[in-house]
Amino acid sequence: MTAGDGEQDPAALGQAIKEAFAQREWVAGDRLPSHAAWCFVCGKDNPSGLGLEVFAAEGQSVSATQQFDVSHGGAPGVAHGGAVAAVLDDLFGFVLVRVMVPAVTRDLRVTYRLPTRLGVDTELSATLVERRGRDLYMEASASQAGRRIVTASAHFVEVDVAHLFDPSARFDLQD
């Protein structure tokens, strides 16, 4: 879904956000909708994307299984740390859908405990830990073969939903 030659369609993103928030309640096991068809991490129409599929978990949590392949590689046999961080940041975005709060990343901290191997299922989970006013604090982890390999924490800030799909709201631009 593009507005033209590589541009994302803000109206399509706005519609996706409205549909996700219109759900009002997610039950553990529900597959959450991608943020946008062109999203680098979860977009189903992005041929360069990672194809992340995320599910509602108990409480204010989400989970996913991701398998990184050679196109996500860093050092031989392992995923690039940036690809891993992108998946975790997007996973936090799904927590926001789970709790129905439009917000953006303020701070993301990723701790790599072990390499993320290519071609191996990576179990991911993220949860909302605390909310103070407009500030949301989350934690996530990634495991392979039962071993925790990555942890992450994030601080998100609630925004007006227009901030997410209206470029003029984000960048003070005139059309």
Image: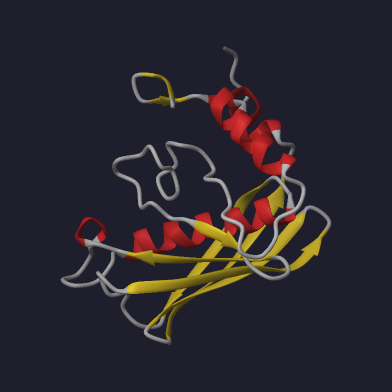
Q: Residue at x 49, y 62 (%)?
A: 88
Pick whichever, 40 or 30, lies toward us: 30
Q: Residue at x 46, y 37 (%)?
A: 37
- As drawn, the residue found furthest toward the bottom would be 147
Where residue 77 appears, as percent x and y from the top left, is: 19, 72
| Residue projecting furthest to the left | 76
Check the image and report above or below for 163 versus 106.
above
| Camera-side residue of 32 and 112 | 32
User: Furthest residue to the top?
Assistant: 175
Say left or right for 59 vs 8.
Answer: right
**How many numbered marks does the figure carry?**
0
Q: Position of residue 35 (x, y in %)?
A: 54, 43
Above or below 11: residue 59: below
Q: Is residue 161 shown above or below 63?
A: above
Determine the residue positioned at 73% across, 56% down.
Answer: 99
Q: Is 103 on the left-hand or right-hand side of 68? A: right
Quadrant in the picture for the N terminus? top left
- Where in the figure is residue 56, as x and y percent of width and height? 62, 62
Q: Position of residue 160 (x, y in %)?
A: 74, 37
Instruction: Quarter of the image for the C terminus: give it.
Output: top right
Which residue in the rendered view is the most extreme toward the right?
A: 133
Quarter occupied by residue 59 = bottom right
Front-lying residue, 60 or 133:
60
Say whether residue 161 is left or right of residue 147. Answer: right
Quarter where residue 17 is shown: top right
The type of colouring in the image is: secondary structure
